[in-house]
Amino acid sequence: MIDISKAHSQVQLTFPHRLKAWLGTLLLAASPLVVAQEAVELEPVLDLESLYQPIHSQLIYGQTATDLIKELEEKHYSKVDVDDDFSSELFDNYVDVLDGSRLYFLQDDVADFETYRYILDDSLKNGSVEPGFDMYNLYLQRLLDRLIFAINTIENDIPAMDFTLDEEILIDREDAPFPASRDELDELWRKRMKNSVLSLRLTGDSNEEIREKLSKRYRNQLDQVLKTNERDVFQTYLATVARTVDPHTAYFSPRDSENFNMGLSLSLQGIGAQLTSEENYTKVVELIKGGPAERGGNLKAGEKIIGIGQGPDGEIKDVVGMRLDDVVDQIRGEKGTVVRLSVIPADAVSESSSRVVAITRDTVKLEDQSAKKEVIELSYSGQEFRIGVIHLPTFYFDFEAAARGETDYKSSTRDVRNLLEELKQEGVDGVVVDLRNNGGGSLSEVNQLVGLFIDTGATVQIRYTGIRAGFTRAFGDNDPEVVYDGPLAVLVNRTSASASEIFAGAIQDYQRGIVLGGQTFGKGTVQEIIPMNYGQVKLTRSKFYRISGESTQHRGVVPDIEFPDILQTYEDLGESSLEGALPWDTVRPVEYSAYYPIQEFLPELTRLHEQRADTSPDFIYLEDQIERSLKYRDRTTLSLNEAVVKAEREESRREEFDAENMRRFLKGLPLREWVDEDSDAEDADTVASVEEDDTADVAQLDSTDDQEVAANDEGAEEEEEADPLLMESGFILVDMMRLSDGGAIAAQNTKTRPSLN
């Protein structure tokens, strides 16, 4: 997913990093002050009537709603009609935002809401957000009611829970019907509470310990819910209005605007991570390249934070169910201070696999995210080859420094140019540009970067709206200098987006190099930040297209040769998974010529690649990972039978353990030693401290269980393994050189498109 934003009067292509859009997503970034809020255990009276207080709107909210509708109707790329159809779609979206898991509203509640279905458009135009507040207030009542139920169940009913019964709970309730009655809702929540208790039973906690932990958790969540204010409701409602137009259009209130703008700055302070709320958990969306969390190697995207401690010895406070902005406040802090996070893996179904990660807060600078190079050495058919690799995490450009006239401003093109010159001096035989997880960046930078590998020509086309509706303009490289004209590969994956897709698409269309990896994200729309009197709107203003005329929207860039990509197993990752995303289409191609006959080589290159992949321990392991991921993804229910859950967990651990050991055996590496789960729990504290001191060795492993085994492996260090995808990219480049005349690729200059009149 990408986001082409206009900041400081410059167009940028950036990655908005999560698929449920902006709502609930905050960057752990620049905050000079530490707001270390400690969870205060409250004992509120568990009575709905005394707890619930309706939330009211303010005059400025209605005025802002009118302004937002005007911006949407006048400036969006597509024609936006805020009418009854829009109102109906907004209604459904808002109900999903409030209760997408069908855990709070009854069927009668939703039926009563139907009176709003076709009047939301009129109320917004008339400067009223009252329907949004009315619906939210009922949701707030239902939420408080469920929390009271949860607390009463946890504090009174744990001893009576029978974990030998063959009960189960639905994992994903997105398509489930709303409960028809209070009794049906109570039964649903009884099972949810039983699942929470079972998760802690599997860690070895006693009933009293479980009661204490869960009571504190849900009372803390109740306390946080009671802090909901009118700004929260307003942001939720107007953000839903904006996203009803398309998934990348968003409204930010003043507070959320500040957080959003942090993501566009060049210096961020914190741990360098993006978080989002998912159910009752705080989930790590992404680690910022070069940030302290990414450098440490212990925190991973997809993991869930369940506790936070301040300093190296501070007590870890439970944050499950806590407001996201409050979690962010606890994690942010001054450079040099330590925060400790208790986290569980992304695919964990219980908290028994939790571990503690210590991170020293630091400043995340653009320099830490700049392009880097390495050289990998290959032995192939008795010959030695050197392949240069350029890792580019984003297409960056320091607009402010350039505007000030500084000559040493940061530029991805400038940095890559220097790295290419260094690689040529080192005598590399080919170059791989690694754009995996590159979410985009500056449009001008990607144009210039393509220009380092071609003489002149278009790199992207932009189609506009508004007064220039239907007008398409080609952007490209006008500098005839070619910095590197040798064998080239571009490595991408599912989270390569925006500017990455422009670069990969242009290299592929020109047949200047071969594109490898996984299908890219597939977002081909352009957003612009427009300030408002109260907050700002991120609005889709245009679309971009490849020089072939094809949009990357939905489809992304399909590699010439595909590699196993675990990210492809995530159903909610990619533009095609987003409701309301603009469609794929085409424009007229521009004139361009192919540099090399890569398509002619492709069948043989593919055959040779598959021959290696079929016997590669790493590729076999990756395919096995994907197969296991798909198996668990397809699960629809979770057992509440303790014996069944234990058996499933043991089977999953054993499958991962055996797969990793088979990979190691085939590569001649030392095998891991199996550690029983009970031993893992007993050694948890020791493991955490070892991991903090030995991250270099542990960071290579794929599962929490393997990390524990490695950490207890008498401190033995292993040589860092080469990235198998980079190595295979190098082998494909060597194949391409061997297939070409004279051992080097010769320019063919074959015309692939007719000239346009």
Image: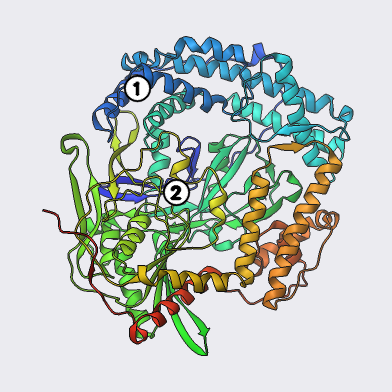
- Nearer-the-camera pick, 673 or 134: 673
Q: Mark 1 or mark 2, which is nearer the start of the sequence?
A: 2
Which structural element holds mark 2? Answer: loop
How is this picture coloured?
rainbow
Nearer-the-camera pick, 334 or 744? 744
Image vertical order of residue 101 relative to residue 524, above or below:
above
Are there few (<14), some (14-19), or many (20+) residues within 10 Å of tag 1? many
Which residue in the rendered view is the most extreme toward the bottom?
382
Displayed quadrant of residue 688:
bottom right
Residue type at mark 1: give it.
Ala
Q: Position of residue 83 (x, y in %)?
A: 33, 18
Residue 65 is tagged as 1
What is the x, y in percent for residue 463? Answer: 23, 44
Where, by quadrant of the figure, is residue 202 drawn? top right
Q: Which mark is residue 728?
A: none
Q: Toward which corner of the image does residue 110 lie, by quadrant?
A: top right
Figure label count: 2
Query: Which residue is identified by label 2?
Result: 30
Q: Residue at x 63, y 46 (%)?
A: 304
- Disc 1 element: helix
Please determine whether, in this image, residue 2 is positioned above or below residue 147.
below
As drawn, is 599 to the left or to the right of 39? left
Left or right? Give the position of 122 relative to 37.
left
Q: Amino acid at mark 2?
A: Ala
Compared to residue 128, the image places residue 339 above or below, namely below
